[in-house]
Amino acid sequence: MNRRKIPLIGLIILMAACTSKPFQPAPPMFKMFEKNNLQSEEIKKEMIACGFPNVITGRNPNDSLGDTAKREHCMFKRNFRYIDGYMGICSTQAARKIKECISDTRIIQ
């Protein structure tokens, strides 16, 4: 292989990496929910009403998966959905072990 091509390939890879946005922090939790074009303040109020202790992270460090399931279920009952289509913790394999998800129809069988 021609030695002059190696730096060119490296430069192309570097340029591609710089144009994307790697290592971006996750958006605040309140921006992950949507419902009928509600504004952020209304979403935050609904999250607090559903028991979310923190509208930025969505949880406390000591929260269980059951705590998360209860809060998500509350939001889903209020016709909210995740903007990325995620169906919540009860839609995952881990849900089989969470008592708050037992009657949830979104559990993966």
Image: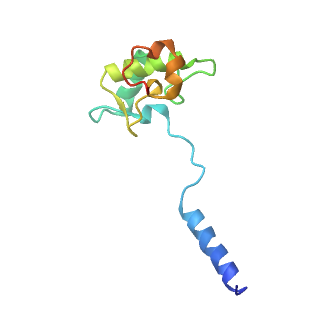
> Which residue sits furthest front?
109
> Is 64 on the left-hand or right-hand side of 82?
right
Image vertical order of residue 82 relative to residue 105, above or below: below
- Please say whether residue 52 is visible from this viewpoint: no
> Which residue sits furthest right?
3
Look at 39% across and 14% down and name the residue there. 103
Look at 41% across and 16% down and name the residue there. 50
Q: Position of residue 57 (x, y in %)?
A: 54, 29
Q: Position of residue 30 (x, y in %)?
A: 44, 31
> Is 48 on the left-hand or right-hand side of 22?
left
Query: Hey, which quadrant is residue 105 in on the image?
Result: top left
Decide which of 60, 104 is in the foreground and name it: 104
Q: Position of residue 69 (x, y in %)?
A: 47, 19
Q: Position of residue 12 (x, y in %)?
A: 60, 74
Q: Quadrant of the C terminus?
A: top left
Image vertical order of residue 16 relative to residue 31, above or below: below
Query: Hey, which quadrant is residue 16 in on the image?
Result: bottom right
- Please say whether residue 97 is visible from this viewpoint: yes
Look at 58% across and 17% down and name the residue there. 64
Q: Quadrant of the N terminus?
A: bottom right
Q: How many marks?
A: 0
Look at 54% across and 40% down and name the residue there. 26
- What is the image's colouring? rainbow
Decide which of 26, 102 is in the foreground and name it: 102
